[in-house]
Amino acid sequence: MRCPLHGSGADPTRLVGRAVEKVVASWHVSDGERSELPLDVWLTDSEGDTTRITTGSDHCLIVECSPPHEPYDLGEWGRVEVGEDLGDHPFLRHLGEPVTSVAEFALPDHGRSRLEIVFPTGRVVCDCHEGDLRLTRAPAQGVPAQGVAHGPAQPAVSQSSIPASSFVRTSSGAAEPRTD
């Protein structure tokens, strides 16, 4: 899944068969308020490898192998905090579970637009919504939905039901599922 600006990144299918042992995220904090959506998420697996999931400036989804960065100051715009204080984070429900499959979706000339990480008890859908990393808890295939979405809700779909023609570009250049 090659992004013209960020390259191919890491192959997320290497997570298959590995358990997610630790989740760390970063958030923008301004005036004492933490952003609702994380900026980055790092998954440490049972092999000790860390996978970072974040968004690019061109609204693509970036997947790379890198450890969490340190918190940093943004001056008058606040700080970026990094840690395990995740609240109701979609990946927490799957700590200790093995990844059973990974599905990637991409748009031509855009790169990765969506990533689904599937566990025995459900899946987490990662995508970019208006430039922000959106993580949505979704049921495993064939299980009724009972999850909580982080960010605007998006229907869960399988890889085979999302051809590239099912996406449209918004005025900001983001890829959104077609609703017509």
Image: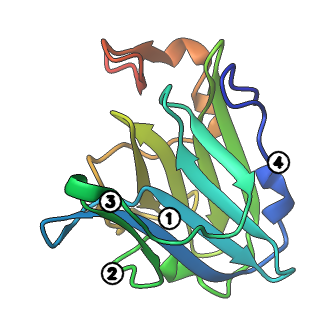
Classed neighbour count for the residue bearing mark 2: other residues with Cα under 10 Å, few (<14), some (14–19), many (≥20): few
Mark identifier at residue 11: 4
23 vs 87, left or right, is: right
Q: Secondary structure at mark 1?
A: loop
Mark closer to the observer (4, 1): 4
Which residue occupies the extreme front position in the image? Answer: 75
Q: Are marks 3 and 2 in contact (CB under 8 Å)?
A: no
Measure the C-alpha gap from mark 1 to mark 2. Answer: 24 Å
Disc 2 residue type?
Gly
The disc, 4 or 2, on the residue closer to the chain's N-terminal end is 4
The disc, 1 or 2, on the residue closer to the chain's N-terminal end is 2
Classed neighbour count for the residue bearing mark 4: other residues with Cα under 10 Å, few (<14), some (14–19), many (≥20): some
Q: Which residue in the protein does label 3 denote?
A: 149
Classed neighbour count for the residue bearing mark 3: other residues with Cα under 10 Å, few (<14), some (14–19), many (≥20): some
Q: Secondary structure at mark 4?
A: loop
Quarter that holds the N terminus: top right
Disc 4 residue type?
Asp
Q: Are marks 4 and 1 in contact (CB under 8 Å)?
A: no
Identify the residue at image location x=39%, y=84%.
85
Mark closer to the observer (3, 4): 4
Is residue 162 shown above or below 89? Answer: above
Q: Which residue in the protein does label 2 denote?
A: 87
The disc, 4 or 1, on the residue closer to the chain's N-terminal end is 4
Q: Position of residue 148 (x, y in %)?
A: 32, 66
Q: Quadrant of residue 36?
A: bottom left
Q: Position of residue 9 (x, y in %)?
A: 77, 41
Q: Are marks 1 and 2 in contact (CB under 8 Å)?
A: no
Q: Secondary structure at mark 2?
A: loop
Classed neighbour count for the residue bearing mark 1: other residues with Cα under 10 Å, few (<14), some (14–19), many (≥20): few
Mark closer to the observer (1, 2): 2
